[in-house]
Image (spheres, grey):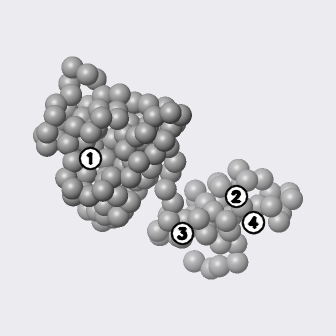
Amino acid sequence: MKNIEKITLGTEVYPIGYKVVTQDLESLNNDSYTITYPINSWYAFPKDQITMGSREDGGIWSSISLASAKNLERMMLEKHSKRVRIFKAALGEILYSDEDRIKTDRIKLLEEVFDEKVLEDIHLILEEALKKHNDSLEEALKRHKDSPRKDGGFVHPNKKY
């Protein structure tokens, strides 16, 4: 088992994982039990449904490292054409873990993880909005939503696509 990072929240120390969710903060599982995770609040799996061990049900699964979360992100895009979000998360009791994943009884999404390319794009769009005093951030974000870029990235104001 890999070494699991820890974080202190208040006076408690918690293991860290990386939770991959849909754009709407929902679990990726395909069954009828979909979880919508809150940000900066604990979500606890129902106690009467918790199971120890490696079974897929009975807990909340997270990636043990950012690298394994990124692999899942890549797989979701390539195999299912779905964009996902990755959050660094505090975890409750560890019910099971292996080389890539951790199963826990509760989770708290702390902060979204962005790669450098996304941060560069965000910086560019904010810079553009600030330079144009007659342009609001909402208008710039709308242009992103209507982006002609195939990869879903932000539109750079001086670049032709």
Q: Is residue 62 visible?
A: yes
Q: Is residue 87 above or below residue 9?
A: below
- The quadrant in which residue 91 appears is top left
| Residue topped by disc 3 | 116
Residue 131 x/y as whole percent? 83, 65
Circle 3 residues within 10 Å: few <14, some 14–19, many ≥20: few
Residue extending furthest right?
133
Q: Is residue 77 visible?
A: no
Specify which label sits upstream in the sequence, 1 or 3: 1
Q: Secondary structure at mark 2?
A: helix
Quadrant assignment for the C terminus: bottom right
Specify which label sits upstream in the sequence, 4 or 2: 4
Going by the numbered disc 2, the residue's amino acid type is Ala
Taking the image as shown, residue 102 lies to the left or right of residue 18, namely left
Query: Disc 1 to disc 4, how far (Cα)?
Result: 39 Å
Taking the image as shown, residue 80 lies to the left or right of residue 38, namely left
Taking the image as shown, residue 89 lies to the left or right of residue 133, namely left
Most foreground residue, 14 or 30:
14
Residue at the spot 30% in from the left edge and 56% down from the top edge: 3
| Residue topped by disc 1 | 102
Query: Disc 4 to disc 2, how far (Cα)?
Result: 10 Å
Taking the image as shown, residue 93 lies to the left or right of residue 154, namely left
Q: Secondary structure at mark 4?
A: helix
| Residue topped by disc 2 | 140
Specify which label sits upstream in the sequence, 1 or 4: 1
Query: Disc 4 to disc 3, how far (Cα)?
Result: 16 Å
Q: Secondary structure at mark 3?
A: helix
Going by the numbered disc 3, the residue's amino acid type is Glu
Specify which label sits upstream in the sequence, 3 or 2: 3
